[in-house]
Image (spheres, rainbow, N blue to C red):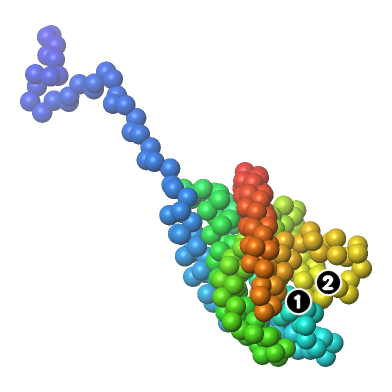
């Protein structure tokens, strides 16, 4: 019996090459800014359902505090602190309270596993969620600021400073809120930390600093939203010291970078568990 090689048979099976082709190269990693924009749009559309209740609660709370303080404060430096503090309180309500609850529930429900499978940097997830939640504070902050200025007879000429105060103070507070939600072992504890943070922003940011004890003033200086309040309050004067305003905004920006970096580290730590 003779043996015929398979190569010479018509339609015969082809010989398997001895060496397999090299493995295909992976695509380039996702860049930060496109990933951030994608996460921001996704978070914005997800939270759009709760936008009206969110705006109503945050704005109604801040306006109510301004009305309540009108019976205690007449005008002057104290009125400026009340209006500025109640305006920034809208940002604190969302950035500290709601964002800590969101990340706490996301961690407890296993939702971080979904983000961990996406080809996006961890910083994009944290920044995108923080920016989406902070976007809902802009209308409420403007409404509270205008209402407070009219209520206390303060000028509206420098209202544009809120375009810098809201994102910078919001970044600092959002980083703290996200870190609380990601580091808390239970979602209930994350909610508690967010509530405590918002209460601190309320008591230390709205109440005039001149009436506080020295120990409370030191605690007030440790709260990042205080510098956003001070920056906005300084613009009510006839001749604002813009250099000091820029310093206050710079402190907010610096704390925002640090707090968002901590939140990114907390996200990596929670995602690998």
Confirm whether residue 269 shows in the render.
Answer: yes
Q: Is residue 132 above or below residue 33?
A: below
Provide residue 15's location: percent of width, then percent of height: 20, 21
| Quarter location, residue 220 | bottom right
Q: Earlier in the sequence, mark 2 or mark 1?
A: 1
| Quarter location, residue 17 | top left
**On residue 81, which mark appears?**
1
Provide residue 66's location: percent of width, then percent of height: 75, 85
Residue position marked by numbered label 2 in the rendering: 209
Q: Residues within 10 Å of mark 2 (few under 14, many from 20)?
A: some
Q: Is residue 60 above or below residue 45?
A: below
CA gap, disc 2 to disc 1? Answer: 8 Å
**On residue 271, which mark appears?**
none
User: In the visual, does 217 lie left or right of 158?
Assistant: right
Which element carries disc 2, helix, strand or loop? Answer: helix
Q: Quadrant of the C terminus?
A: top right
């Amino acid at each position: 019996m003779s043996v015929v090689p398979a190569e010479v048979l018509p339609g015969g099976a082809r010989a398997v090459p001895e060496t397999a082709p090299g493995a295909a190269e992976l695509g380039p990693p996702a860049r930060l800014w496109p990933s951030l924009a994608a996460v921001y749009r996704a978070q914005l559309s997800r939270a759009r359902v709760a936008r009206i209740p969110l705006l109503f609660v945050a704005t109604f709370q801040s306006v109510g505090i301004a009305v309540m303080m009108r019976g205690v404060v007449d005008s002057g430096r104290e009125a400026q602190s009340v209006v500025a503090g109640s305006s920034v309180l809208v940002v604190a309500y969302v950035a500290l309270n709601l964002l800590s609850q969101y990340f706490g529930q996301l961690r407890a429900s296993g939702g971080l596993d979904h983000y961990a499978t996406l080809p996006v940097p961890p910083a994009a997830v944290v920044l995108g969620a923080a920016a989406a939640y902070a976007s809902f504070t802009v209308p409420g902050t403007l409404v509270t600021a205008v209402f407070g200025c009219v209520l206390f007879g303060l000028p509206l000429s420098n209202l544009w400073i809120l375009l810098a105060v809201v994102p910078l103070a919001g970044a600092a507070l959002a980083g703290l809120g996200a870190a609380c939600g990601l580091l808390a072992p239970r979602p209930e504890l994350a909610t508690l930390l967010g509530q405590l943070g918002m209460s601190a922003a309320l008591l230390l940011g709205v109440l005039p600093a001149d009436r506080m004890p020295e120990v409370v003033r030191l605690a007030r200086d440790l709260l990042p939203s205080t510098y956003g309040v001070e920056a906005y309050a300084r613009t009510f004067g006839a001749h604002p010291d813009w250099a000091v305003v820029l310093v206050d905004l710079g402190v907010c920006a610096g704390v925002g970078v640090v707090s968002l970096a901590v939140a990114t580290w907390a996200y990596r730590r929670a995602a690998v568990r």
